[in-house]
Amino acid sequence: MPWAAVIGSPIEHSLSPLIHQELWRSAGITGWEYRKCEVDAQHLHQWIASLDSECVGVSITMPCKKAVIPLLDVVEPQAAALSSVNTLIPSGGVLSGFNTDVFGMSRAIELSRRNAGMDLGGRAIIIGSGATAASALAAVISLGFREVDVVARAFSGGKLPADFNRSAMNLGVTYSGHDLTAAGTLSRCCEQADLVVSTLPSGALDPYVGELSTMPLRSSFLDVTYAPRETAAISCCLERGIPVAFGVEMLVYQAVLQFKLMTGIEADSHAISSVFQLLEAK
């Protein structure tokens, strides 16, 4: 029986099985199994070694996105530059790694701005400096945002977050780093924003939500958190009429590209709408 899986730790909260199974259903794929597997970095090698010929693909979450790279035969250039693989495709005995997070973010941002009649480009503010922030950096650059400010705790004391800085150098991107914990820093950066992307985990941005009030009405906002769907930051932006992209939109669109890599099938708009309806009803 063909099967796919999502791996990581913790994994119980993952929505990947629901999303992929609905995409399979819409495409008429039956008899496949989608597994949810608790796998940490320590046991990753053993789990990857156990893959059989029936596996069509693996969705990878933290803490395995970087740890999986040495176990792969091929890593696509963008994933290699970011040191972040969230999709594994086994084919003919070759294990290939991809990053679909960048596509998920860029698609969610693009659609939210298009629906609001906004152009792409200008200055982007990224909040956070972890692996998701590195993917956000690649996404905003791909959309034409050439000026980038990164606001994160990691910049306190004038330090540079090593992994994030390495990803930026690999992408050939320059950015300005700012200390999130310094009073008023986020507020000042947001004053010039055309786009703000928060890559912080759920609740971590809440103490700084008031500083988003300086965002111009021409700007838009993406919060990668999808639980809860409407974060305090999103509520703040919606109250001011600022277009937002929800974390669940990023989640779905990165899965849509995973689905194509795993099946060779392009999900149509009906299938994608069905996924959103399913998640809203959950």
Image: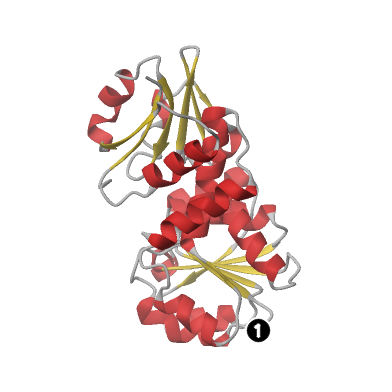
Quadrant location of residue 48?
Answer: top left
Q: Is residue 202 above or below residue 39?
A: below
Q: Mark 1 points at which residue?
A: 217
Q: Is residue 214 visible?
A: yes
- The percent coordinates of residue 229 (x first, y second) are 41, 67
Report the front residue among 33 and 125.
33
Q: In this view, does 102 lie above or below 3?
A: below
What SS does tag 1 mark? loop
Q: Which residue is drawn at 25% across and 48% down?
A: 12
Q: How is the image coloured?
A: secondary structure
Where is the N terminus found, in terms of image quarters? top left
Quadrant location of residue 105?
Answer: bottom right
- The percent coordinates of residue 233 (x first, y second) are 45, 77
Where is the C terminus found, in terms of image quarters? bottom left
**What's the amino acid at mark 1?**
Leu
Q: Residue at x 69, y 80 (%)?
A: 218
- The percent coordinates of residue 112 (x first, y second) are 63, 66
Report the front residue among 163 and 243.
243
**How many marks do you count on the picture?**
1
Tell me the crowding category of disc 1: few under 14, some 14 to 19, or many 20 or more residues within 10 angstroms, Cα based: some
